[in-house]
Amino acid sequence: MDRVTAFPGAGHMPPLAPLSHPVQRLNLSVRDPNAPAWQPAPRFWWRRAAAFVPAVLTTGVLARIFADWLSDGGMWWLEWVLLALVTLTFFWIALSVGTATLGLVCHLMRRHTRGHVIAPLNVALLVPIYNEDTAEVFGNAFAMVMALRESKSAHRFELFILSDTQDAGIALAECRAFETLRAALPPDLRVWYRRRARNTERKVGNIRDWITGWGAAHEAMLVLDADSLMSAEAITALADEMAADPTAGLVQSAPMVIGSDTLFGRMQQFSAAVYGTLLSEGLAGWTGTEGNYWGHNAIIRTRAFADCAGLPRMPSFSGTGGLILSHDFVEAGLLRRAGWAVRFVPHITGSYEEPPATLIDYALRDRRWCHGNLQHLRLLGARGFHAVSRFHLFHGAMSYLLSPAWFGLLVIWALLGNGPDSVITYFSMENPLYPVWPEMSRVNSVLILVFMYGMLLAPKLMGAMALGLGEVRIARFGGAARFGLSLVVEILLSILFAPIMMVQQMVAVLRTIVGIRPIWSPQARKGGDYNLATVAMFHALETVSGALLVMGMAAGVVSLWLLPIAVSLVAAVPLSMLSGRRMGTLMATPEMIEPPAILQLARRHREMFRAAETPPLAAE
């Protein structure tokens, strides 16, 4: 066995009848006989049309405008590539606008109704960890179980801390923290700790180990990340949703990002609080019972997951196959394929996680996610997946492939976008080897640029407008003046950071294509400590790309419309250094101004566990 307990006498988890967790074959479409018969509500079809049809029509109109412009005098192959890239990249912008618009409608029409809970559930709270900050993990866990005890919920909850830690020092700290936790908790609260000696198949293997060994005693499992924090009300609401809906195999909450005081972390927190609500409402509106799973802060029907969501190995020439890294999307698709509903419920508040603290930390996490999401392209042809589940897989991959597309669009525009004085010279009849590059009037150029920037900013402005419908909610951001300033600063900063993140995601895609596997290491949740030399090396490609753009503009062969992008790329190193700077009250969120009770409780318990660490451990 590759399982070890925390320490002798710490308490073993109960010996339960194991659940099956078969490895599914993707070429087989098998309905779970335990899944109840049901039909999705018909309203989701018009909601999907409301999000997708305007996106397709708007993209078609823009493509037609560009095609008319480029076809003047015939189209060269590079112009066809430009048209394809414009169409591809703009569709996803238009879809986000359609989703936000649908979210605004759903937000205005929203009625919260909770179904009747037929019977309370026995729910396991699972916290998989790997070389994490011990005090943070156990402080959050302590806060959640104590809050649940005070809530007097009808459901029964047990906490399982599932360690994959391989560092001996951190493993010892976990054992001591668990001893402290058990001593501090009332005797009626059931908590368990298990550490695997070998972290076989990473988080997937960690969850599978728990299911096959101890899952049979729990109707549902609430999967959390090491940085997850949920209020008792949010946990109970998820359990209520599952108890009231026998068709639900998985119910996903919408975690809010909290806990960061860096510039980059604040950007993510503010944007999620202001704009994320409408996008979440819209996503829930058109996905319906074909929602997605993000790997944490979601409740799952244990038996359904065990019987239907066993992950296959990725196909390979050797026949052994590789591990699916972004397992959550696939698991959601397998559950829906077997006949279970997968639902996203953004109206449940009190679900939290922490964002990456710096731009480099964000990019490093993206490299791992990119590798896993691009794997999904090889699963699109699997039998039985619902069309929306396939779209989730495709969309996850496209979220990274769009960055090389944007970069290609940028390069082509730099080469050709300044008309007769472009980098690639287009000759007339004296040299007919090249076609004449069509000239667009200054007015048309400005109109198209304004239109595209307007589409990019539309979800942000709609999110701010939705908040403005209620004066109290604006006040929770520190008042109208601070909110307005924070909104402008966040928009300007996102414009500055976007080209840098585009290049970093392109790097992540190229690393995946050439076979460089990402290192599975714990996230630097409080931000890595990066010196100037490290940051300069990390952002060398952006700096060089920006310098080339500036040189082209100085020579008059690159369009000045690319100046904002060039400035961002040239300033990648100072912007990255700035991303980790500690902030005051700018871009404050309601959770920062008035920290929720569960966050205050977690912070107190984290300090308790830090104080309980012995001096020898601190010296290590």
Image (cartoon, rainbow, N blue to C red):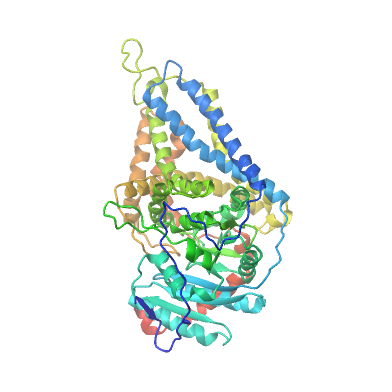
Q: Is residue 110 left or right of residue 441?
A: right
Q: Nearer the viewer, residue 110 or 27?
A: 27
Taking the spot 45% from the left edge, 64% from the top edge, the residue there is 525
Residue placed farthest to the bottom in the image?
9
Taking the spot 60% from the left edge, 55% from the top edge, the residue there is 273
For the image shown, how many numbered marks are present on the structure?
0
Residue 106 image point, x, y percent: 68, 49
Q: Nearer the viewer, residue 238 or 225?
A: 238
Residue placed farthest to the left in the image?
318
Q: Is residue 90 left or right of residue 409?
A: right
Residue 200 lies, with reference to residue 466, above or below; the image says below
- Image quadrant in which you'd find residue 112: bottom right
Residue 523 image point, x, y percent: 41, 63
Quadrant of the rendering where the C terminus is positioned: bottom left
Residue placed farthest to the top in the image?
429
Residue 448 image point, x, y percent: 54, 29
Residue 559 can be seen in this image: no
Residue 463 lies, with reference to residue 199, above or below; the image says above
Residue 262 can be seen in this image: yes
Q: Nearer the viewer, residue 602 or 340?
A: 340
Residue 584 lies, with reference to residue 399, above or below; the image says below
Residue 135 image point, x, y percent: 47, 76
Quadrant of the rendering where the N terminus is positioned: bottom left
